[in-house]
Amino acid sequence: MKIVVCVKYVPDATADQQFESDNTVNRVAVAGELSGLDEYAVEQALQLKENAEDPESVTVTALTVGPEDAATAVTKALQMGADDGAQVVDDAIAGSDALATSKVLAAAINKIGDVDIVVCGMASTDGGMGVLPAMLAERLDLPQMTYGSLVQNKGTEFRVKRDGDTATEVIGASGSVVIAVTDQSGEPRIGGFKQIVAAKKKPREVWSLADIGVDAGEVGLSAAWTAVESVEARPPRTAGEIVTDEGGSGAKALADFLASKKFI
Amino acid sequence: MSEVLVLIDHVDGAVKKPTFELLTIAKRLGEPSAVFIGAADKAAGAAEAVAKYGAEKVYTVDDAEIAGFLVAPKAEVLQQLAGQASPAAILISSNIEGKEIAARLAVKLESGLITDAVDVQAGPVTTQSVFAGSYTVQAKVTQGTPIITVKPNAAAPEESAGAGAVEAFAATVSESAKKARITKSEPRVSSGRPELTEAAIIVSGGRGTGGNFEPVDALADSLGAAVGASRAAVDSGWVPHAFQIGQTGKVVSPQLYIAAGISGAIQHRAGMQTSKTIVAVNKDEEAPIFELVDFGVVGDLHSVLPAAAAEITQRKA
């Protein structure tokens, strides 16, 4: 059985973000890391392997698309326990939107071939659109089992608990599937020293767009189907009035403030 | 004038408020045509509701055959409708399902997709808030039919009577779209309070509640507000995940946000930073949340919140 877990290299979420003159995110200035939400996907991929009838026959491949530094995301997944890694690197990819990224990922998954399960995080911690897993399911023509907080399977029969907008649902599908998990699906493990050492020896593939059969003209900033017109830093919030509660004065001051703003 | 398709977000035919906001926005872009995918016997009621907010046409699609499958069939229906109506844009609510429908539709129609718009003007030009609300971005779709998902509270819904001409649309849904079955569905129990993502006022509790949400509930009810929570409170098992506000929970932008016992980590800020007015109550005067607030009270939420709730109830009486 082959499992592919898609991982994204993102700017450190706690750092100040910057934009380039072409309105793309500066992905060099800020140190990057494996998107925190993708660690949950790696964890589920590893659990699917461990719970399989013959775990030795299952491979977990960590797949990423991004600049050279994105190898960091694959390394982290290998340290957690993934078996091998694959990265699509090509200058033409810079500035790709989610539609183009999903096209590259789908082509890479097809290049890996005979993939049984694709696992993704619910969203990235930078762009945060949360649309990529659905796009992958559409492109690969596989059942979409997204926003999962619990993943169960008996062989190729899958059940995913989905905490939807207005209901909690159980999604069922069989055969090959695309699964996306939330941060409620189970805490990701931390690779130990032995695994960190072992990760260095694990096989990794690096592919160009040509290697996976994607035309460079179909991806990147110039081929994006949306264009950013302007980017503006939000004016910093100026600190407001702070009062200290003394014997009930805080509640009254709060009510006065809410009344002054016409909330009561 | 070109049609603008608006996918109706509803629960058993009851149209949700963000749909009226979408219709208000659609009028800026063209002629609003609402799309109802649901039970045939609920179509007339939904059509009447959206006509009040300017829907000139209402396409109704009986979902008897597709209700048991996740997302994919709805994207196919919209694809076929778009083929017939050649709309100027397609507007969908920015919630989990709405964004996934939009994602699949964008691939099918080979069209650009913009999610989480907080405003849409003629063009259409969208406004989005990115990186935890630290930047505002204006963007437009440059290829195909603009597909835009819009966040709740992006516009004040304006009543204006539309013709509301009902047109039944017979979609043909492929077997391919019926691969992910919904085998069980439990509607979330309604709290009787406004829905978190749509509420004008939200009162949230965090670690500082120590697991006692009664003061938070009391203040929320005095203001007619929704109740939210930080991840710390959810992870401690004090409230369900549906309450979580932040990067991995709901992203909200109400008129008033009151954070009680929440320190204000970046992940939480990402979910509430664009609220119009922010108030915090926290024992720790060094808590980073105080950097964002319009008004802050340094004090114990367990005494401040109930007293404030009583004061507000009295003033409203």
Image (cartoon, rainbow, N blue to C red):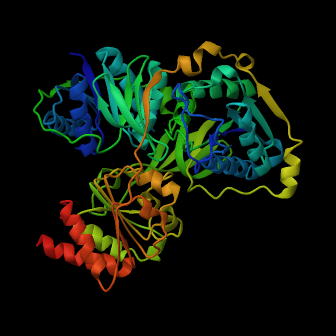
Give the percent coordinates (x, y) of residue B78: 36, 25
In the image, is A196 to the left or to the right of A52?
A: right
Give the percent coordinates (x, y) of residue A15: 59, 48
Quick one: B133 or A145, which is closer to the camera? B133
Give the percent coordinates (x, y) of residue B272: 40, 53
In the image, is B2 to the left or to the right of A172?
A: left
Q: Quadrant of the N terminus of chain A?
A: top right
Q: Quadrant of the C terminus of chain A?
A: bottom left
Give the percent coordinates (x, y) of residue A181: 57, 48
Tell me the quarter of the picture where residue B262 sits.
bottom left
Count of number-bearing discs: 0
The residue depicted at 44 percent of the width and 46 percent of the height is B133
Residue B242 appears in the figure: yes
The residue depicted at 19 percent of the width and 63 percent of the height is A260
Q: Is residue B111 above or below residue B301?
A: above
Quick one: B298 or B168, which is closer to the camera? B298
The residue depicted at 65 percent of the width and 19 percent of the height is A92
Residue A140 appears in the figure: no
Q: Is residue A104 above or below residue B264?
A: above
Quick one: B84 or B141, which is closer to the camera? B141
Quick one: B183 or B135, which is closer to the camera? B135
Q: Is residue B259 above or below residue B273?
A: below
The residue depicted at 21 percent of the width and 36 percent of the height is B43
Tell me the quarter of the picture where residue A155 sits.
top right
